[in-house]
Amino acid sequence: MGEYESFNQALIECVKVAGGSKVVGHKLWPEKAVDAAQRHLLACLNEDKPERLSPEHLLMLLRLARDKGCLVGIDFMLGELSCAPAQPIEPKDEIAELQRAFIESVNAQAKIAERIERAAGRVNVRAVA
């Protein structure tokens, strides 16, 4: 893996890492026969052909490559947009962050519930007076 002259070259590397054109083609178009899906994928990655990946298929390809540790497609796009290379979030890190956010939200809800109870208590005292 290294520098790529075009986005398609970076995507071809993603396909190789994700299992090859037969495997990836069939994952992108499960309704097609394996060979037909492979041919369609190869046509989409051939700059001389009119076929192109849809945004959904492109995202799926980038995810398949990311699952294998390959970020060259994403990094190519980010480089073209003058952005820093991708920093993947590991699933364990994401789970920990989501758990922290959940605990914070539960604590915030508890504080709000206490304030509601205090405010409701003040309203009841005023109604009695």
Image (cartoon, rainbow, N blue to C red):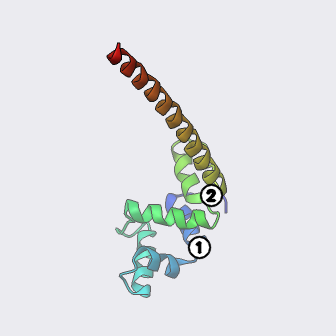
The answer to which of marks 2 and 1 sits earlier in the sequence is 1
Q: In this view, does 75 lie above or below 29?
A: above
Q: In the image, what residue type sits under mark 1?
A: Lys
Q: Position of residue 120 (x, y in %)?
A: 40, 25
Camera-nearest residue between 67 and 15: 67
Quadrant where the C terminus is found in the figure? top left
* Residue with the mark numbered 1: 16
- Which mark is on residue 5? none
Q: What residue lies at 60% left-to-right and 58% top-to-bottom?
A: 71
Q: What residue lies at 66% left-to-right and 56% top-to-bottom?
A: 92
Q: Where is residue 105 in the image (x, y as percent from the top left)?
A: 53, 39
Q: What residue lies at 54% left-to-right and 71% top-to-bottom?
A: 15
Q: What element carries label 1?
A: helix
Mark closer to the observer (2, 1): 2
Q: Is mark 2 on a helix, strand or loop?
A: helix
Q: Is residue 129 left or right of residue 73?
A: left
Q: In the image, what residue type sits under mark 2?
A: Pro
